[in-house]
Image (tube, grey):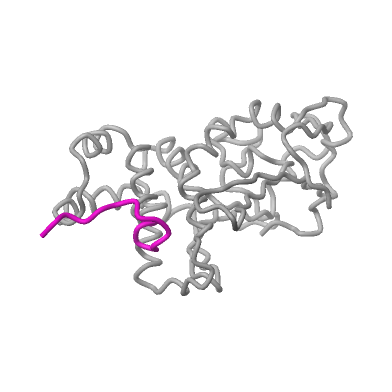
Amino acid sequence: MLNINAIAPEELNLESKFKFRCYPGISCYKSCCKNIDIMLTPYDIMRLKRRFNMSSGEFLMKYTYVFIEPRSGYPFVFLNKNDDNEKTCPFLCEKGCSVYEDRPATCRYYPIGQASLKKFDLTDGITEEHYFFVKEPHCKGFDEEKEWTIAEWRKDQGVDLYDDMNKGWRELFFTRNLKAEKLDEKKQKAFYTACYDIDAFRRFVFESKFLNIFDVSEERIKKMKEDEEELMNFAFDYVKFLLMVKETLKLKNK
């Protein structure tokens, strides 16, 4: 998990400025890839399983473990660490990150952290985004002279696309029902399949009676068959419906 002691007590916005640079040759290079718990988002998993030409189920089995949040029962997926003394990332190689083009959102943001908030007087979605510095003792990147705004860093690291793709998933954690019950095992499994195991979710939608139960337009069905990102967004809608976060789907009339 994120080391709370490494979080700088300062609330940042997109225009906040900071100095940072990471590059081969800096004394701490690759230190941030050791002994760290990296949570994977749905889009992270989709990008990585494509890179390795694996099914989502195969990728999850080989590279990840599941953490069930005790209070909510929500399942979160984390990247396994290598079984070595430094507990390195499985994708770390001599030159650096072997999956750099498809690295997870957490790695792209570093050394920035993100916090999403929802105002109680509004009904839908995430309404505020805040940022903070993650300043770990080993990191020398803050001593460099290259200056950024948070917005410039996000653009340079490609996190805008990742945040956009994961928006529906992140909204699942902002339910209006503050007294919502903890997810039972059945809902945990449905949540996990829809959000993380996209290939299993595809089979669930197209090889079961799902489309006989839910009223899904032919246009949307066509898009889901042709575009995996469309299927992922539909999966988020399904979980919102399942958890009664929002009426995102409709049942067919009997």
Residue 217 lies, in percent from the top left, at 20, 40
Which residue is painted at 56% across and 38% down in the image? 103
Query: In which image quadrant can residue 194 be found?
Result: bottom left
Residue 127 lies, in percent from the top left, at 59, 46
Residue 202 lies, in percent from the top left, at 27, 47
Quarter occupied by the N terminus? bottom right
Query: In which image quadrant can residue 222 be found?
Result: top left
Quarter occupied by the C terminus? bottom left
Between residues 230 and 59, which one lies in front from this camera angle? 230
Compared across the picture, whether 42 is left or right of 140 comes to left
In the figure, 253 relative to 198: above or below?
Answer: below
Looking at this view, name the residue that lies furthest to the front: 121
Between residues 20 and 224, which one lies in front from this camera angle? 224
Compared across the picture, whether 158 is left or right of 112 comes to left
In the figure, 4 relative to 15: above or below?
Answer: below
Which residue is painted at 25% across and 53% down in the image? 250
Between residues 246 and 69, which one lies in front from this camera angle? 246
Residue 83 lies, in percent from the top left, at 60, 58
Residue range in magenta is: 239-254
Between residues 124 and 121, which one lies in front from this camera angle? 121
Which residue is painted at 39% across and 62% down in the image? 244
Magenta stretch holds residue 109 = no
Which residue is painted at 64% across and 27% down in the image? 155
Magenta residues, dominant SS class: loop
* Mark count: 0
